[in-house]
Image (cartoon, rainbow, N blue to C red):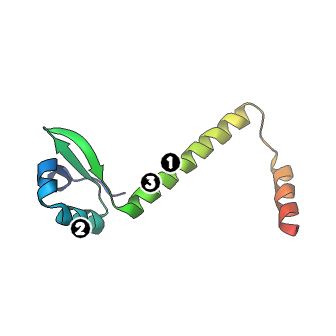
Amino acid sequence: MSKILPTEDVRPLSEFRAHTASFVQQVRETKRPMILTQHGRSAAVLMDVAEYEALVEQVELLRDIHVAEKQITKGEGVPHSKAKNQVLARIRR
């Protein structure tokens, strides 16, 4: 995800309502999210769909890593050689 530029990517909700199509086009072209404000405070984020999907995938991967680290700490891990043999056995089926 590209870095947000406050001068271009933080806009009031009222301006978004008036220029929705151009805001969506900007987000698609720049791949940067847009922060929409209401009464001077952040209210919502408009993102490109592909950028959103990539972000969700990254979060899911990080969660999986976190769970795996907890399992290893508890001694629930599988040694590399055993894991390799299990994978190879499944491939051969």
Q: Which mark is residue 72?
A: none
Q: Amino acid at mark 3?
A: Leu
Q: Which residue is mark 1?
A: 59
Q: Residue at x 31, y 63 (%)?
A: 31
State the residue in front, 66 or 19. Answer: 19
Count of numbered labels shown in the rendering: 3
SS type, badge 3: helix
Q: Amino acid at mark 2?
A: Gln
Q: Which residue is mark 2?
A: 25
Left or right of 36 on screen, residue 93: right
Q: Residue at x 78, y 36 (%)?
A: 76
Instruction: Give x and y (percent) for residue 63.
Output: 57, 43
Q: Earlier in the sequence, mark 2 or mark 1?
A: 2
Q: CA distance from mark 2 to mark 3?
A: 20 Å
Q: Residue at x 71, y 36 (%)?
A: 71
SS type, badge 1: helix
Q: Residue at x 45, y 58 (%)?
A: 53
State the residue in front, 21 or 75. Answer: 21
Q: Which mark is residue 55?
A: 3
Mark 3 and mark 1 in contact (Cβ < 8 Å)?
A: yes
Left or right of 81 on screen, residue 69: left
